[in-house]
Image (cartoon, rainbow, N blue to C red):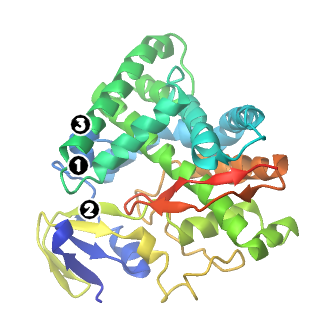
Amino acid sequence: MAPAVDVPELNAVLITRRDDIFAQEKRIDVFSSRQPGGLMTELMGENMMRKDGDEHFAERKIAFPTLSPRTVRNQWAAKFQEATDRILDGLDTSRPCDLVTEFAMPVCGEALKVITGLTEMPAHEMDRVSQHMLDGCANYAGDPEIEARCHAATAYIDQHIDQMTPKLLAEPDSSLLSVQMAAGLNMDSTRANVKLAISGGQNEPRDVIAGMVWALLTHPDQRSLVGAGQASYLDVFNEYTRWMSPIGMSPRQVARADRVLDYDFTEGQRVFFMFGIANRDPRVFDDPERFDLLRDNSKSIAFGAGPHFCAGAAASKSLVADIAVPSLFARFPNLSLAGDVAFGGWAFRGALAMPVSLQ
């Protein structure tokens, strides 16, 4: 319709074209991540994702020892593989299983336990609190039940932070909770960033694991490319996250009035960068609705495009593309769908359930 479209039902202006988002996300002086009254800040605390400039960079730098490619490769990958193998060992091959809840969910939950430092939290609870926080952050209709579940989830996380704090002060490690405390970051920000890691590190990788498997099973020609060595699981990851972006939208607040994209933005206005739509922009991607492992998807902005580029990208690629999905297909080469698969969500999108036969 236009580069920027006002959608009254969302009380927001949507920016949907890939090149526009790529350029405007970097203009933090206009499109600010800081949203004092925004849903994420109100419900989860002011984390680094809701800060800009030096303040954002300082907290991102503190978290880097946890999420750096080197730490992922040298410390987390082996733990990811160990947990994945254990979960695969426990799958019941005599019946169809739900790949979302029985594989993707616990794989991501176990990974987050070691990354965050909340090792006493059960994996299924990690998934629950993540989902309830994400539901809260997308609750633009103001449903009080969704808000209450989100508050309960953040309180539960705080209990586990309180439980692990003395242990990690006594025996520091590379977990996010530990490195933030070692750097002297205030506890409000420390708590908010742990909650951010859970909200961004559970559902999205879970949805990509399940989604990648579904995409390969429903596109046998593309799966054959992987089997023939013409495409890698990283190629599958990159194309799937373009084609079915697990994070479909990221909100911003207009910090100062500006006319751009043929639209007069006013201070305080809410803006949504629509990553999911941008990754199917026909101006950038040929036949964007097609799942194609051989396409050039280097312009995908599934992880963002500016200073808030996903800090957990290396961990996500390692867990999903290097370990979880390859291990699943190696263990169960005859894996097949055992029913219909429904997808849901718009700000965060993924399979709701995925019945599969393992044999």
Looking at the rendered structure, which numbered label has been put on residue 148? 3
Q: Residue at x 23, y 49 (%)?
A: 39
Left or right of 58 on screen, residue 216: right
- C-alpha separation, residue under disc 3 versus residue under disc 2: 24 Å
Few, some or many residues within 10 Å of mark 3 (<14, 14–19, 20+) = few
- Please tell me in which quadrant of the rendered image residue 160 appears: top left
- C-alpha separation, residue under disc 1 versus residue under disc 3: 13 Å
- Please tell me in which quadrant of the rendered image residue 253 appears: bottom left
Q: Are marks 1 and 3 in contact (CB under 8 Å)?
A: no
Q: Which residue lies under the disc numbered 1?
A: 39
Q: Amino acid at mark 3?
A: Ala
Left or right of 65 on screen, residue 163: left
Q: Which residue lies under the disc numbered 2?
A: 252
Near-viewer residue (273 or 222): 222
Give the percent coordinates (x, y) of residue 85: 76, 36
Label located before the other in sequence (2 or 1): 1
Q: Amino acid at mark 1?
A: Leu
Few, some or many residues within 10 Å of mark 2 (<14, 14–19, 20+) = many
